[in-house]
Image (tube, coloured by chain):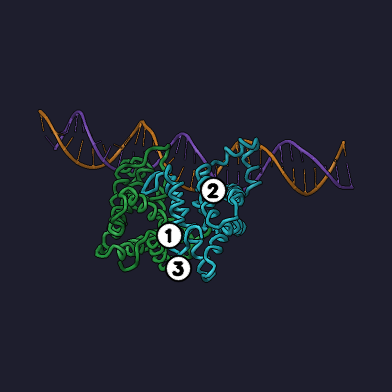
Chain colours: A green, B cyan, C orange, D purple
Amino acid sequence: MKVRDVAEAAGCSIGSVYNEFGDFDGLILTVNRETVQALTARLKAVPADDPLRQLHGLADAYLGFATEHANLLRSLFEHRMEDDRPFPEDILAMVMDAFALMHAPLVRLLPGRDPDDVALLSRMMFSAVHGIISLGLEERMVAVPPEMLRERLVQFVDTHLAGLGVTRGA
Amino acid sequence: MKVRDVAEAAGCSIGSVYNEFGDFDGLILTVNRETVQALTARLKAVPADDPLRQLHGLADAYLGFATEHANLLRSLFEHRMEDDRPFPEDILAMVMDAFALMHAPLVRLLPGRDPDDVALLSRMMFSAVHGIISLGLEERMVAVPPEMLRERLVQFVDTHLAGLGVTRGA
DNA sequence: CTCGAAAATGAACATTGTTCAAGAAGAATC
DNA sequence: GATTCTTCTTGAACAATGTTCATTTTCGAG
């Protein structure tokens, strides 16, 4: 993305882009905000009736979004702020909202466990799924091939839940 | 990294940097090659006696390397080639060599399984561990806090192996 | 010492984020 | 409607950085 391209696409001058977004970071962050909102909307559309099916659905929805908007997700996760400025709080809050959707079903599946432990577990599972998907879609390095990602994500979630003592269909 | 900084650090002219590395991509890729080699050396130092302990050791070694050289690993995994040129084969081969170190113990732990299945499983576990570590060290988004990464990685490997039917100590 | 090939040089160029003085547009007052 | 003040918009100019290439330097062969 280039400032000049944005200006031309918007039919205004370069300076107006700066008036609107402040600087390049502001431009990127605006895009990232929309990305989080679009992702959240997609995750919210996953049925929440059965926690296990919900987890599968969330992983699949995340995969779908990552497949269709690979560059947007990369921008969201890989962009570093200029001059070591802190990452905007409001985006962090939005991401946490989206993440709550993935946390909830795990809480239901692990009722006996310490809540702090479940919180860390869900963070870990999200990071793991994110890693599997993002590396897989890169199609380089040691990744799961994209055409197998979908079925393998189901397997991953099932295997990990089994390791946590959740028996299928329970 | 800037071409001018490299030239100054090497005590030569800008043009000489181009004579040596071709272009900016060539410069980055040279660094990435050294990164893979350093990582491989570190992973090879992990004892291979017990497969379970080896897996834990490999995850821990990866975490250590990622902690000490976060920027190098990011360059290796996030750098995109200019003009959609293909990723260099020799780096891919070096990464595969490093990956073989992680694949081997999984094969020993899952002797009955289909080799293709184990190959995909190990790719998935690597991608998962990579995701947990890279997001965790970013310290933003939904990540496992860095100070907990070490113990949580042990838990992750154990949990996933348990889900695969590997009983501890067997 | 001379010549030619090879290597090194850095000025100049292209791209891109950024600034800001000048101008245009609009709002407020008379 | 005219004047003045405020706000917004503009794009030329600047800074940083990757890239090129004619020129210069180096250096070995004859």
Q: With respect to residue B56, does A143 lie above or below? A: below
Q: What is the CA distance from the residue labelled 1 to the residue labelled 3?
A: 11 Å
Examine the rendered structure and indicate whether residue A17 appears above or below residue B55.
Answer: above
Amino acid of disc 3? Met
Q: Is residue B121 above or below residue D9?
A: below
Specify few, some or many for label 1: CA neighbours under 10 Å numbering under 14, 14-19, or 20 or more.
Answer: many
Quadrant in the picture for residue D23: top right
**Are the residues at dot 2 and dot 1 in contact (C-beta closer than 8 Å)?**
no
Q: CA distance from mark 2 to mark 1?
A: 23 Å
- The residue indicated by pointer 3 is A148
Q: Residues under labels 2 and 3: Cα distance?
A: 28 Å
Q: Which residue is mark 1?
A: A133
Q: Foreground: A166 or A141?
A: A166
Q: Quadrant of the C terminus of chain A?
A: bottom left
Residue A64 is tagged as none
Q: Amino acid at mark 2?
A: Ala
How many badges with numbers are in the image? 3
Q: Provide the secondary structure element on which disc 1 rests.
A: helix
Sequence-wise, the earlier of marks 1 and 3 is 1
Circle number at residue B61: 2
Say which quarter of the image contains residue C9.
top right
The residue positioned farthest toward the front in the image shown:
B169
Q: Secondary structure at mark 3?
A: helix
